[in-house]
Structure formats: structure tokens, C-alpha cells
Amino acid sequence: MASSGLIDSGDTSFIIISTALVFLMTPGLALFYGGMVRKKNVLSTVMHSFIIMGVSSVLWISVGFSLAFGTDYGGMIGSFQWLGLNGVGMEPNPDYSGTIPFLLFMAFQMMFTLITPAIISGSIAERMRFPAFLGFIVLWLLMVYYPLAHWVWGVGGFLREMGALDFAGGTVVHISSGVTGLVAASILGKRKGYGKEPMAPHQLPMTVLGAGLLWFGWFGFNAGSALGANGLAVMALVTTNTSAAAGALAWTATEWIHRGKPTILGAASGAIAGLVAITPGAGFVTPMSSLVIGLIGGAICYFSVSVLKAKLGYDDSLDAFGCHGIGGIWGALATGIFASASLGGTDGLLYGNAAQVGIQAIGVVITIVLAVVATFVIMKLVSVFTPLRVTAEEEELGLDISQHGEQAYPDFIGSGYLPAFATAVKTVGAPAASGQPGK
């Protein structure tokens, strides 16, 4: 991005607001996921997103930003030139930040590193040990997110040089996290009783509130990626809302036809599917193209969750792969189909450039391979130091108590917890008086 060297107050104000909006998406995701699990696991699920806000922020300013956007090494990774934000100041950077402070560009990109690993937590909810989760996330950011962000967005990154289009994170955020979630869930194995016991969401209003916050925050996610208060940001905002609306309608209609009744969980999931699908092309496609992208995205994500998941038998707890992995793949390919040079980018298949679809497909495949291989290696490495999965007894009791010693909805007598709660916390894992395993 060219820079005049001067800060524009309007652009700066807009990106500050967009940064705050993207930040809000991670607490929104915590609510979205938290409402979808059983009540004995709601706090542990929310904790995954919340703790990432701390871990990822510290790691990003320490080393992540430099690895993602520092001086290129062979198209593969950035240098350590901005380690600890050394040299990242309040003036614009001619390669990245246009008319906004370079420090603000860093902060905006940091918010992407919060939401991306939080998405993964939806696949492993209700069964992964908290210490293993923390170790996994740190290694995943270092081995997957930072290199991939450099490949796609960093000056000299090989996918960027190839011409792969990713306006706001279809490959970097959604495909990487969705595919990672699928691999991690497969290694952990299914939840106890999966397919045999009811595992319905315990608090759908919480999930809908989370979906609303995600939709709201996504305007900063996509429109903010224009890095200025300009026409491109407006176009990204309009395409984002259009695709989200189309995705919600498509999922609802498909579910209504397939199952006989429309559900609020389906409408919320469809909106997320539409948002995911438009992310890579938000600033590259027209509003009518985004309508098609959202409609198809909502429908295919519904079938991936309702049909493909059942046929293959994997336990992706909260459908991170079904919405983000599948939706991200479709969105990346759709960008190659619908991209229009009239918006300042590159033409896609619809406008006579069939090669762009091939370039997008290469980016998709490379992202999938990186996520699969790295996730397998990281899971095996973490398992050397700590068990990945809670015990059967801890899973039965719930991760809120077994991992964190607290409940979201405790029973009260007067002002204190029921004695049974305290007893359960103390005795988890201990043999019962009869000699049988405690429960």
C-alpha cells in the first residue's frame, strides 16, 4: 500500500473503531459457543475464547507481528526486526499502513489473531484439558497463523506474490482454523456418549446474542481491511451484510425443506456461514455477487453440518469445520469466480480470468496441508508433556468443575452452594466408598 507519509485523522478514527469491533468478535464467539454446549461445560467453553484474548495479544506484540509482517525471508516468514514492537511507531509504514499509524495497523491485525484460534475451540469443546489447550494454541500461532499470514499478506509472501486474493482472512483465518479444528477433534476422539446421548445446546438465546455480536463485529473485520474510511470500506460493508443475510435465509430455507421446521440456531449459523464465505472477497466482489456467495455458502454449510458430518462420523463439537472450514473454502474459490477489477483488484472467472480460480485453489490446498500437518505434529508434541483429553470421570462431571472448579448455574441454599458441589470438586478422580469409580 502506498503511503504519503501523512496520517489521515478520518482513516485513523475508522480503523480504531474497526479494531474495537474486531476485538468484540471474540467475546461474541464465546457467547455463541457457550450457548451451544451443555450447561456443565459453558464456562470452560467461554474460558477458551477469553484466555486466548490474553495469550494471543502478548504473543503477537512479542514476536508474532514481526514474524507475520517483518522483512521477508524467501517468501516464507518475516524477520525479527519488529520483535517486541521495536521500530513499530506512530508514523505510517509505506508498505502496510497507508495513512494510519503503523502501530494501529499492528493493533488491527492483532485482533485477527484473537478470533482465529478461538474458532478452533469450537471443535474440541467439552473434552480437551485446559493445559493441553493452552500449549496447543501457543504452538499453533507460531507454526500456522504467523507463517500463513506472511504468505498471504506480508510483503514478499509467496501466496501474495502468486496473486492469491484474501481480502480479510478466508484462508488465514477461516480455512486454517476450521481444518485445524477437524484434525484436532479427530485426534481427541468423540465425546463420551456422542450419538447416543442428547447433547443439545443449553442456552440458545446466548448463542443468538453471540451471533449478533459476531455479525456486528464483522463490519470492522471486513470493512476495516480497506485500512481507510473510503469507498472500498463501504463496498466491503455492504457485501458483508448482504452475504450474511443471504446465508441466514439460505440455511433457514434449506433446513425447513430438509427437516420440516426452521430453527433459530439454523438462522444464526447461516448468518455466520455467509459472513465466513464473503470474508476473502468482501472488497473484491460486487453486492450482487455477494448475494450469490452467501446463498450458496449458507446451503453448503448446512449440508456439511447436517449430512456430511453424520456420514463421516466425526465429532466437531460446535461445527467449526462445517461453518468456517467449508465456508472458507467456498469463499476463497468464489472470490476467484466473482472478483471484479472494477473494484481495484483482479478479475475472476466471471469477468474472463479463469486462471484466478486456479490460483485461489492453490492457496486453499496449501492452507489445508499446512493446517493438517502442523496440527498433527502439535497435538503429538503437546501429548508428550500433558494428556490431551480429560478423563471419563472428569468429562461426565463437566469441564467447568473438573478443569476450573466453578459452575455457571450453581444451585443455591441461602447464600452458599449446595454441599454436593464442593464435594464433587474435591472428590473428582477419587474412588467412591464402595470401591467403584467415583462419579
Image (cartoon, helix red, strand yellow):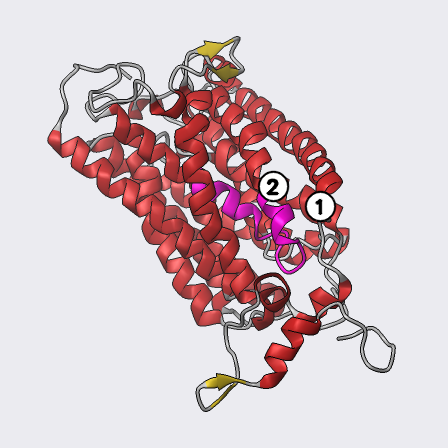
- Quarter of the image with the N terminus is top left
Taking the image as shown, residue 221 lies to the left or right of residue 402, namely left
- Image: magenta residue range: 113-135
Give the SS element for disc 2: helix
Amino acid carrying label 1: it is: Thr
Residue 241: percent from the left, percent from the top? 33, 48
Q: Amino acid at mark 2?
A: Gly
Say few, some or many: other residues with alpha carbon within 10 Å of mark 1 (under 14 / 14 to 19 / 20 or more).
few
In the image, residue 126 lies in the stretch drawn in magenta: yes
**Mark positioned earlier in the residue sequence (1 or 2):** 2
User: Residue 184: which numbered mark, if any?
Assistant: none
Residue found at the far bottom of this picture: 414
Q: Which residue is mark 1?
A: 386
Do the numbered discs 1 and 2 sit on residues whose CB atoms are within 8 Å? Answer: yes
Q: Left or right: 416 with respect to 377?
A: left
Give the structural element (helix, strand or loop) at label 1: loop
Q: Is residue 139 magenta?
A: no
- Percent position of residue 54, x then y: 43, 45
Numbered mark located on residue 135 in the image: 2
Q: Residue at x 70, y 65 (%)?
A: 395
Q: Quadrant of the C terminus?
A: bottom right
Question: Which of the two residues, 325 or 5, is positioned nearer the viewer here?
Answer: 5
Q: Is residue 65 above or below residue 395?
A: above
Q: Residues within 10 Å of mark 2 (few under 14, many from 20)?
A: some
Asked whether, in this view, residue 387 is left or right of residue 263, the answer is: right
Residue at the extreme right: 435
In the picture, measured across the screen, residue 154 lies left or right of residue 21, that is: right
